[in-house]
Image: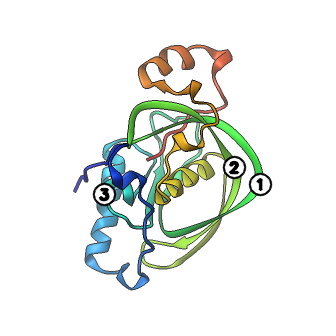
Amino acid sequence: MILKVARLGHPAVRTAASAVDPAIIRSPEFQRLLDDMVETMREYNGVGLAAPQVHLSLQVAVLEMSHHPRYPNMPEIPLTYLINPQVTILEHATIDDWEGCLSIPDMRGLVPRFKQLRVTALGRHGEELDFVANDFHARVIQHEVDHLKGEVYLDRMPNLRSLSHLAEWQRFVLETPQKQPQRAGESG
């Protein structure tokens, strides 16, 4: 089922999410929620979606990028379920890149993100996950984990002058090579 996405201004977007009780992860209701989140992310062509974006104050995010038409040069991200994720920064160098968000439709902004991080979380069936994410993958995870804290990419922007409406961004930023950063990314 496609879920309704909360937009910036709705309190759900700015509320820190609660940890998920591991005992409920295998329940049919929670498994259905995970399926609905993936379906919603795909419906809106996102590469990530966090539970607060669908009005649920739970520390849950889903990510995936495979043959995405907006990001033909980006490496694939397998379908990943992150429940109660914890992030440790491994490389403090940051990379500025463009981000958008399903909760802030039709906008883009230049956001610094850490290049490399370690993620520990529970997976779809409560299994322990522990992996290192780099570059775009790390950016998507940081974007979604921010949602779990009640934060959005705008909060990370040191300069709001790059904030652009999508149509103008495509016209004036993407079509002007000297202004284009390394990559363009959008998460949930």
**Residue found at the very far left of the displayed protein:** 1
Q: Is residue 2 above or below residue 99?
A: below
Label 1 packing within 10 angstroms: few (<14), some (14-19), many (20+): few
Which kind of residue does numbered mark 2 sit on?
Phe
Which kind of residue does numbered mark 3 sit on?
His
Q: How many marks?
A: 3
Instruction: Provide the secondary structure element on which disc 3 rests.
Output: loop
Q: CA distance from mark 3 to mark 2?
A: 27 Å
Q: Is residue 87 above or below residue 156?
A: below
**Residue found at the very far bottom of the displayed protein:** 23
Q: CA distance from mark 2 to mark 1?
A: 7 Å
Residue identified by numbered label 3: 55
Q: Residue at x 33, y 62 (%)?
A: 56
Label 2 packing within 10 angstroms: few (<14), some (14-19), many (20+): some
Q: Position of residue 111 (x, y in %)?
A: 61, 38
Q: Residue at x 26, y 74 (%)?
A: 29
Residue identified by numbered label 1: 91
Q: CA distance from mark 1 to mark 3?
A: 32 Å
Task: Answer with mark 2 or mark 1, whichever residue precedes in sequence.
Answer: 1
Nearer mark to the viewer, of 3 and 2: 3
Q: Position of residue 132 (x, y in %)?
A: 67, 62
